[in-house]
Amino acid sequence: MKPQSLTEQIKRLARYAGFDLCGIARAEAPAAAVARYRDWVAAGYHGDMDYLARRMEERADPQTILEGARSVICCAISYNTFLPRSIEAPRRDRVWISRYAWGDDYHLVMRRMLEEMAVGIEELLTPQLVKLRACVDTAPLLERTFAREAGLGWIGRNGALINVWFGSYMVLGEILTDLELEPDRPVQNRCGNCRYCMDACPGGAIVQPHVIDARRCASYLTIEQRSEPSEEEREVMGRNVFGCDICQDVCPWNESAPLTREDAFCPRPGLLNPRISKLETLTAGDFDRKFERSPIRRRGYEGLMRNLHIAKENHIAGDI
């Protein structure tokens, strides 16, 4: 089967699986992107996320993840909903949970979809043997770089992948394969002179276009950092208790982004801009039940309560 014909059939399988976007990149990380990533880690911008500094060779070469890899099938799906953005929602006595965490854990959703797609590829090529490996955020892969190479969008000043139709409210997943597929072309960066994300970031984490100091990011502070935050970090956290959407919420490309077709990303009751009083009464048992299959479980009960306490203090102090 010709690479171009096979590529089109694989993209059709991606649509059947529920993905909004699918593109192909060669299984070769651009040297410039690898160098920028090494510099980012060397600068300490990854903070306590030590796993981002490990397995550097694998990040530079996908063939160390899947021997014989020749192509990266990059997929994306929107998690956008019709509900208000953080910059629009009422703030008094309320806290914010990042939009992507309102529904089921995207790792579970994406893996199910990628595995369904992989089965379709195997059936398509039977009896030919094919190597396939699904990756969802956990493999040491420069996924936004490959998504850009696959034409899914460009990387904005805030480090998010932006698509001209879907904006940046997307999650990414990949399938590494030894198939020789027809690669797509990168798209032009269309941020222009816009600085909305840089100017809106509460911690000034976007230290220069496309370079994020995670240690100053409210998302990092509420999810990844385990040590007790300083007074300055508490102020940056504001009313965020899990993640932060501000740099995406101010992005013009998200103003008319279409809504997700995936029910699993629809908000669970009580997670959109919840009142402090509704969350601070949760017991550990309530937490386990309420956040089953939720990305919020990653932070744990104690972590969420810590963040809630800080948000409440910020409300009282009038910092938000």
Image: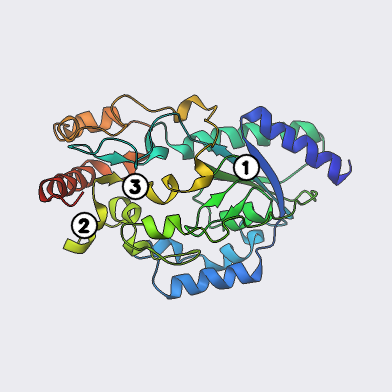
- Camera-near label (2 vs 1) is 2
Secondary structure state at the residue bearing disc 3: loop
In the foreground, 309 or 122: 309
Amino acid carrying label 1: it is: Cys
Task: Return the mark for residue 26.
Answer: none
Amino acid carrying label 2: it is: Glu
Residue 182: tell me if it is visible: yes
| Label 2 to label 1: alpha-carbon separation | 36 Å
Task: Return the mark for residue 75.
Answer: 1
Residue 106 as seen in the image, left or right of residue 182: left
Residue with the mark numbered 2? 235
Residue 311 as seen in the image, left or right of residue 111: left
Percent coordinates x, y for residue 159 in the rendering: 49, 58
In the foreground, 247 or 196: 196
Secondary structure state at the residue bearing disc 1: strand
Amino acid carrying label 3: it is: Gly
- Camera-near label (2 vs 3) is 2
Crowding near pointer 3: few (<14 within 10 Å), some, many (20+)?
many
Image point 35% across, 65% down: which residue? 47
Residue 186 as seen in the image, left or right of residue 168: right
Counting residues from the start of the chain, the first of labels 2 and 3 encountered is: 2
Q: Quadrant of residue 164?
A: top right
Residue with the mark numbered 3? 243
Counting residues from the start of the chain, the first of labels 1 and 3 encountered is: 1
User: Which quadrant is home to the N terminus?
Assistant: top right
Crowding near pointer 1: few (<14 within 10 Å), some, many (20+)?
many
Image point 25% across, 32% down: which residue? 274
